[in-house]
Image: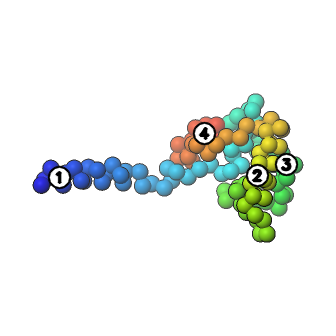
Amino acid sequence: MIVVLTGILNLTSCVVADMDSTNHTSVPWIQVFQKVDSTGQTNSHERKEALYSCGVDRRENLDDKNWGLNTVYKNQTIEEMMERKDRVISCMKSKGYQVYGFEQCGPLKAPSGLCPN
């Protein structure tokens, strides 16, 4: 009986080991856009201007950690949001930006170094 309880306790501790939600907090959306020739040192002002010229509304606060291209605006369908997102990403790539996935940037707690700014 003690062996069974020890096994259950060991199994439980393995499952609960990574309950710290900050381990999974992603970088802000804006940081996934990095200039190809200066990844990790992308000029944030130039990046914002590039995003605005690619169709992001200038009223958007790109410094807000909640900003992202996955926002569905009022009177907009999910399909329209996806088209807008694809259009902005394509435009940014045409301007010389690499668009990293959140997993490539790493969580805020353990960043990869690709998306620091």
CA distance for labels 1 and 4: 40 Å
Which label belongs to residue 85?
2
Check residue 75 in the rendering and tell me which mark sits there, or answer none.
none
Which is more foreground, mark 3 or mark 2?
Answer: 2
Distance from disc 3 to disc 1, alpha carbons, whole Å, reads: 60 Å
Which quadrant of the figure has residue 82? Answer: bottom right
Name the one closer to the observer, 66 or 41: 66
Could you tell me the amino acid type at mark 3? Cys
Q: Which residue is mark 3?
A: 54
Residue 12 position in % (x across, y down): 30, 54
Q: Which of the 4 image quadrants contains residue 32?
A: top right
How far, Cα to Cα, is label 3 from label 4? 23 Å
Amino acid on which disc 4 is placed: Gln
Residue 77 falls in image quadrant: bottom right
Q: Earlier in the sequence, mark 3 or mark 4?
A: 3
Q: What secondary structure is marked by label 3? A: loop
Which residue is tagged 1?
4
Look at mark 4 in the image and give the residue it sits on.
104
**Distance between the Cα atoms at labels 4 and 2?**
19 Å
Of the numbered discs 3 and 1, the one sitting upstream in the chain is: 1
Look at the picture and state if 57 lies above or below 95.
below
In the displayed structure, 36 sits above or below 10; it is: above
Residue 114 appears anywhere in the view: yes
Circle 3 residues within 10 Å: few <14, some 14–19, many ≥20: some
